[in-house]
Image: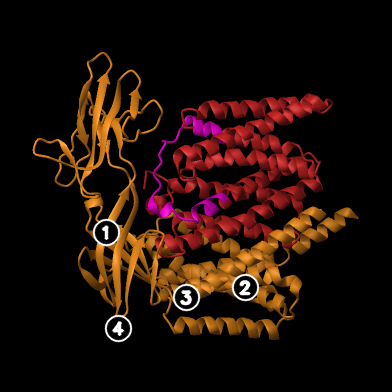
Amino acid sequence: MQSSKQTQKVDSASEGFREAALFTITAIIAGFAVEWLTAGSGITIPRWPVNFLFLAVLAVSVAIVGLTLRKHPLVAWLGGIPVGLSLIVGLALLSFIGGVLPQDPAHPGTLVATLRLNGMFSSWPFAFVTLLFLFNLGLSFLWKVVPFRVANLQFMLFHGGFWIALSCGLLGSSDLQRLIIPLNEGQESSIAYEMPSERPIQLPYSIYLKDFQIDEYVPQFALYDPATDQVLEEKSKMVPEVRKGARAVWPGVATATVLEFMPDALPDKDGNPVPSKAHKGVPFARVRAEADGQPPVERWISGGGPEIKPQFLPVGSYFIVIAPGAPKAFRSHVMISGTDSERRVAVLEVNKPVDFRGWKLYQMGYDEKAGRWSTMSLVEAVNDPWLPAVYLGFFMIMAGNLLYFWKGVKKMEAA
Amino acid sequence: MTLVEFPAIAKAAIACWGAGSLLQIPARKSKPASLVSWLLMIGGTSLLVWFLVAYWITLERPPLRTLGETRLWYATLIPVVGFLVEYRWKIGWLKYYCMGLAAFFLGINIASPDVFQKALMPALQSPWFIPHVVVYLVAYVLLAASSVAGWHNVWLKFRDKSSAVSESMSHYLALLGFVLLTFGLVFGALWAKEAWGHYWTWDPKETWAFISWLAYLGYLHLVARKTKGTVLQWYLGLAFLVLLVCWFGVNYLPSAQNSVHTYSGAS
């Protein structure tokens, strides 16, 4: 009795899976065939309004097919779990290829380029599988919405949110603009560059860079071995920070103590440091060091800068050196001017983008060779008109997820 | 608290777990032995919690930046899952696997210590940093436990000793893990928009996070389709391998050359 029940369970579970797997494999092969025939040209998603029209046609098709042919075995199968699961596996496999192989330009004519394995997420197989998945997901969503039942809310939010985020994220990617604006201190610019083509684009606003600043972590000092071109590990396994009174011990080799520390200083004509304005000088430290079995030595050392030579302290066959602190924060003080008289003073900083007329402006980078003395700032301007739709999808997924968690906990308690 | 003290604390935690586990043998018949056993096991984890807090204070940033730091969290949290499972389902064996896994990860950290570094690159200085990483870590911990439970259930089935309670436990661990995995993924996307300008760029780590998410989404659909238990336990056992690639393996893949998630160097 039990065995017949078990057989029934297995049968109902595997029902439709073979056809669904064949369906997905066919879509993938068809996609690769298109790539093969077009030498790996990939899919170019049309821009507004064609992408929107496509999305509308897809949504309406799902609605018509789902509502009028719901009882049809083929449609029921198309919106069922076996097809959904096979397409999930298909998406995972294609993503696996995209997650293993570098998604960079490849030599034309190679198998990777011809099948577009180096551009998996804009390839025809990925597009076919995603499209079929959206159809499947759309049908399953629709059948939970009509007839409406509050008990299905979690399903609707999760599946509906995923449909919106996936479709709008992929179809809207063609309208996404990510432009780089190089700015120099004391200058205004309204020219941005599209990457990687470096095509210049006139912006509907201009940005004046008043000041660019970098904050750094406290500099560190280390014992450098020129013979091996490496720094020795300190007793505490830390790279010691340069602070007045800081002491470092390299067991069996040397000890060092920071006697004085000037975070911003410039050397006078004798090479002795004189405190300067913040961000204008370099860190100087007076260090006393002692190599094992040798008399102590003492002098000012610095990490140097564009016009200041670095200074070291020789200790036996080693040197005590100052390494500048890693960048802690960098920011651009800017004034943004619209085509009319609108002007806005803003500070652009990493993780703190500024919105201006539908664009998000990001602090992106600076002249890394000049480091903290950089007078150039790279700003990224991003315009993504589909973002609100994608975020709606994200928040629906999270709401559905919360309900799922709640239901799961309830079931778990009952189990 | 720095990494100098770490090996001693990690070894002490492992010793506590080991001694506590051994005491579980007499604990079946003796209440005092049971009490001491639990004090030791919980004490081992408490040592790590104490180290994490003290290390966080010394670092002046959340210890969530390097792979070694994530292993430390993992080693701290996974035995907690084992203890909670015993409390909730009265299933005792999971905690041994969990403590074993935690000891293994501590062992990796002892063998290849991190460099103590306070610097946190500007992109990581975000309110999203802690929720994104912590939610992911707890998800990984739960899914690792579900995977271990899956393997154990396969073994039980092999010996004809299947347990419905044990299968139900691995399912709920996976379910909770999936919920947190989803939050981690969406939090990551929202953070990426604020820090890097776009919510999704198919960076290898993102791609693997998506694959892992799809793997568990597949599992939940198999459950919805009432697939038989053995298949599900095998699935849970194997699915964690995908997460491991996402967590550690991505760094070694050809695709990782330009990833922002390789956790190497100071930047």
Give, as a three-letter code, the residue at label 4. Answer: Asp
Which is nearer the eye, A369 or B261? A369
**Residue of label 1:** A212
Region in magenta: B105-134
Give the class, few, some or many, for how many residues have Cα within 10 Å of label 2's Cα (few <14, many ≥20): many
Give the class, few, some or many, for how many residues have Cα within 10 Å of label 3's Cα (few <14, many ≥20): some
Which is nearer the eye, B241 or B127? B127
Tell me the residue at 19%/45% (across/down). A305
**The N terminus of chain A is located in which quarter?**
bottom right
**Residue of label 3:** A386
Q: Is residue A51 visible?
A: yes
Q: CA distance from mark 2 to mark 4?
A: 41 Å
On the same chain, marks 3 and 1? The answer is yes
Q: CA distance from mark 2 to mark 1?
A: 44 Å
Which chain appears red?
A: B
Decide which of tag 3 and tag 1 comes sooner along the chain: 1
Q: Residue furthest left?
A: A269
**Residue of label 4:** A340
- Tag in front: 2 or 4: 4
**Whole-percent x and y of residue A47?**
41, 80
Q: CA distance from mark 3 to mark 1?
A: 32 Å
Determine whether the residue tagged by mark 3 lies in a helix, strand or loop: loop
Marks 4 and 3 close (CB-CB < 8 Å): no
Determine whether the residue tagged by mark 1 lies in a helix, strand or loop: strand
Give, as a three-letter code, the residue at label 2. Answer: Gly
Residue at mark 4: chain: A
Decide which of tag 1 and tag 4 comes sooner along the chain: 1
Which is nearer the eye, A31 or A49? A49
Q: CA distance from mark 3 to mark 2?
A: 16 Å
**Whole-percent x and y of residue A391?**
53, 70
Q: Is residue B256 above or below residue A9?
A: above
